[in-house]
Structure formats: structure tokens, C-alpha cells
Image (cartoon, rainbow, N blue to C red):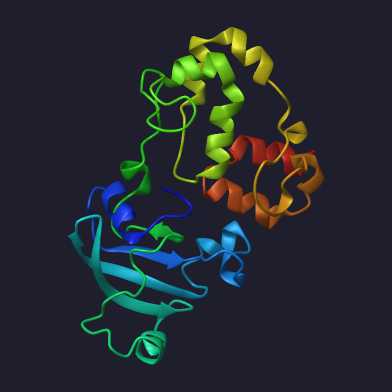
């Protein structure tokens, strides 16, 4: 689902909940330049999707337009003058990013995956998280770094498979970053960028404990 999908798939993946806030982040545009900017509701143009009317695979979606967090329908009026009733243009195109579902915890929509659950996509489709952890634990860590909504109960997996825990017990500062603007660097390399580390904590990609270790070393 993340980071590139159309509004209709996002609608189904969040359990047909409305409203939800999205931003279209076409590759190459400034608003797609960093993960922070892609999910910032107060930068660039966003849409609060209020109504979705599927028709087959796609359909039409309707809602309000915002620019830098404030209501602003100039874009729709100037670029799509024939669109009426707050229809959202290009709703069926890819590269939309889910930002928020107001009034609902995203942890409720995207619960933490347990060891006995089955992965439903990718090269290990059909296998349990426990089996994947034993075969290729790095793949699960990689999935977490590529999707801010994808979370695995690594504490449960470590308790179930202590022999694998020995392989993963690397100091946080020495771990490589596999995403974003610091891809290829270690956490030790970027520990002076406290605001970025705080952002990683806010999206669940870095624990509070690891954050404290990094900034106090």
C-alpha cells in the first residue's frame, strides 16, 4: 500500500474509513523529496477524502483541498474547471500517500504483526512471520523501513527464537540505515541530527530507548 498507491486502494486498506488525509507525491517533485515532507500535513497540497464511490477497480473520490494546511481550492478550479462537487482529480492514479485518518489511531488500523500471522505479499508470501524471521530476519527489518505502517512484534520473535537474537544484537549506533536521506549511513553517523532522530521515534522507526542511547553517547 505504501508509499505509492491510488485513493481507492488506500480506502480499502484502511477498512473503508472516511475521512482520510492524503497527498499525491509524484516522483521527482519537491514534495516527494523526503519522507518527512511526504507525510507532513502542513506542507504542499493535500486532500481530505470525505466520500469514495467505487466503480469497478476505480471510481470517484470527493473531498476538500488544502495547501500548506489551509483550505485552498485554487488548484482544482484552475486546472480542472470541469470537475464538480469537490471531486478529487487523478484519484485512480498511483503515488498517493496516506497521511492520517482523523479520529482513528493508525495503530488500530495497522496492528503489529505477530509471529503466527501470515505475510500476504512479497517473496515470502504465505509464510508466517516466525518462519520468515528464522529464514531471513533482515527482510522483516527491511519491510519496516520501507513502510511506516508496517510493524512487526520483534520482541515476541526474539523471545521465541533466541538463537536468532544473537545475530540481530547489534548496537543501534552501528546499524545501517536502509531508507531516506541518510540511506547507507549508520545511526552513529547521523546522531547529531537530533530532529531527524526525533522524527524516526515519532513514526515508530526508532525506539525511545535507542534514541536516548544515541544522543547520550
Residue 134 versus residue 91 in the image, above or below: above
Left or right: 194 in relation to 158: right
User: Where residue 167 sits in the image (x, y, percent)?
Assistant: 68, 16
User: Where residue 7 sits in the image (x, y, percent)?
Assistant: 33, 60
Q: How many marks?
A: 0
Please tell me in which quadrant of the rendered image residue 184 appears. Answer: top right
Left or right: 19 in relation to 202: left
Residue 158 visible: no
- Which residue is nearer to you in this view: 217 or 156? 156
Find the residue positioned furthest to the top.
163
- Which residue is nearer to you in this view: 51 or 121? 121
- Which residue is nearer to you in this view: 50 or 155? 50
Residue drawn at x 72%, y 46% is 183
User: Where residue 111 sits in the image (x, y, percent)?
Assistant: 36, 36
Residue 35 visible: yes
Residue 16 versus residue 140 in the image, above or below: below
Left or right: 52 in relation to 98: left
Residue 70 versus residue 148 in the image, above or below: below
Residue drawn at x 53%, y 10% is 161
Please tell me in which quadrant of the rendered image residue 8 appears. Answer: bottom left
Residue 174 versus residue 46 in the image, above or below: above
User: Where residue 144 sits in the image (x, y, percent)?
Assistant: 53, 37
Quadrant into which the C terminus falls:
top right
Residue drawn at x 66%, y 54% is 196
Amino acid at each position: 500500500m505504501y508509499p505509492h498507491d491510488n485513493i481507492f486502494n488506500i480506502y480499502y486498506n484502511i477498512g473503508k474509513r472516511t475521512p482520510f488525509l492524503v497527498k499525491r507525491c509524484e516522483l521527482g517533485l519537491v514534495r516527494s523529496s523526503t519522507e518527512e515532507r511526504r507525510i507532513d500535513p502542513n506542507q504542499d497540497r493535500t486532500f481530505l477524502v470525505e466520500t469514495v464511490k467505487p466503480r469497478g477497480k476505480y471510481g470517484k473520490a470527493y473531498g476538500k483541498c488544502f495547501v500548506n494546511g489551509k483550505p485552498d481550492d485554487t488548484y482544482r478550479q484552475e486546472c480542472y474547471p470541469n470537475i464538480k462537487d469537490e471531486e478529487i482529480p487523478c484519484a485512480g492514479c498511483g503515488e498517493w500517500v496516506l497521511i492520517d485518518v482523523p479520529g482513528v489511531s493508525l495503530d488500530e488500523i495497522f496492528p503489529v504483526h505477530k509471529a503466527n500471522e501470515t505475510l500476504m505479499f512479497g517473496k515470502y508470501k504465505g509464510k508466517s512471520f516466525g518462519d520468515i524471521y528464522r529464514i531471513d530476519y533482515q527482510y522483516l527489518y527491511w519491510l519496516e523501513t520501507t513502510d511506516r505502517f508496517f510493524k512487526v512484534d520483534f520482541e515476541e520473535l526474539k523471545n521465541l527464537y533466541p538463537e536468532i537474537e544473537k545475530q540481530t544484537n547489534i548496537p543501534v549506533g552501528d546499524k545501517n540505515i536502509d531508507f531516506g536521506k541518510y540511506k547507507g549511513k549508520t545511526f552513529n553517523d547521523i546522531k547529531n541530527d537530533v530532529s531527524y532522530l526525533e522524527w524516526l521515534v515519532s513514526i515508530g522507526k526508532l525506539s525511545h530507548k535507542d534514541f536516548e542511547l544515541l544522543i547520550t553517547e
